[in-house]
Amino acid sequence: MKKTILQFSSLLCLLTLMASCRKADKPSSTPTSSGKVLLEFTNTVGGGALKMDGSWYKNQNNDSFTVSKFNYYISNIKVNKIDGTSYSEIESYHLLQQSLSSSMNITLSNVPAGVYNSISYTIGVDSLRNVSGAQTGALDPANNMFWSWLSGYIMLKLEGVSPKSKSPGNELAFHIGGFSGTNSVLKTITINFPNTITVNGDSNHIHLNADALKLFGTTNVIDFSINSSVTMPGVMAKKISDNYQNMFSISYAGK
């Protein structure tokens, strides 16, 4: 009888020890460590990659065109958690240039641990920085994305040619700016991830696509025979900004 009791006690201790080990080995379900979120932008035209090698495209008005320059500002980036809180990048101003591949990648460091489901940012440069005097880095006027302290920054620039253009040399020049009043072109957008991402001491990758074709037709169809050059704030710049607020999408979110 004593032997049976001893065996039972030993078995009970072994089971208790195994349960404790399993509990200790089980990882915490709550993320605890900050990490990185890598934003990787790709410019496209319709369903294909944007090329500045003389490749021909057609806009929504069936006007043929090529692209020789495509630049735009992304600022005030936030990644948003499922609980409604957000992480905002500090000094968040980026000039993305099709001709400079390194500019198409943005690293958000020290992103707090948690589960995130969307990203928000402004297309352009916020009104405060438009009137804050000489800037450096991405906001340096030497980048040729600035008019004057009165007109401010060029938020998006696309140049090229089209046979339909009546400008000299059939040029296209869409320099879109304007930071105040009814013709402000500033657009703040939020895009949901295709799935949630978890930041926990590691890196996540977000692949964003910017479709240049949408500048010319998502809301307002642009006819190059009528409007081939927009180089100052105004009604046409506002119409094009109403189009390009829809040009971004996310194709991937994950490790």
Image (tube, grey):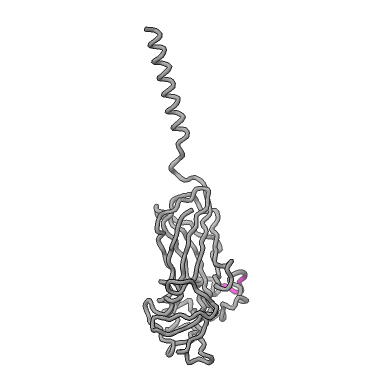
Along the viewing direction, whichever of 24 and 133 lies nearer the viewer: 24
Is there any visible trace of residue 239 in the rendered image?
no
Along the viewing direction, whichever of 84 and 117 lies nearer the viewer: 117
Measuring 45% from the left and 25% from the top, which residue is drawn there?
17
Q: Give the quadrant of the N terminus.
A: top left
Corner quadrant of residue 102: bottom right
Q: Which residues are magenta?
A: 132-136
User: Is 154 part of what is drawn in magenta?
Assistant: no
Q: Position of residue 154 (x, y in %)?
A: 53, 78
**Above or below, comparing residue 114 to residue 19 in the picture:** below
Q: Position of residue 200 (x, y in %)?
A: 49, 48
Along the viewing direction, whichever of 47 and 9 lies nearer the viewer: 47
- Tally the numbered discs: 0
Measuring 59% from the left and 71% from the top, which residue is drawn there?
100
Measuring 59% from the left and 74% from the top, which residue is drawn there?
133
Q: Main secondary structure of the magenta part?
A: loop
Measuring 39% from the left and 84% from the top, which residue is drawn there?
61
Along the viewing direction, whichever of 101 and 55 lies nearer the viewer: 55
Q: Position of residue 96 (x, y in %)?
A: 54, 70
Q: Which residue is outermost to the top?
A: 1
**Above or below, comparing residue 83 to residue 146 in the picture:** above
Q: Position of residue 107 (x, y in %)?
A: 55, 59
**Above or below, comparing residue 71 to residue 6 in the picture:** below
Is there any visible trace of residue 246 in the rendered image?
yes
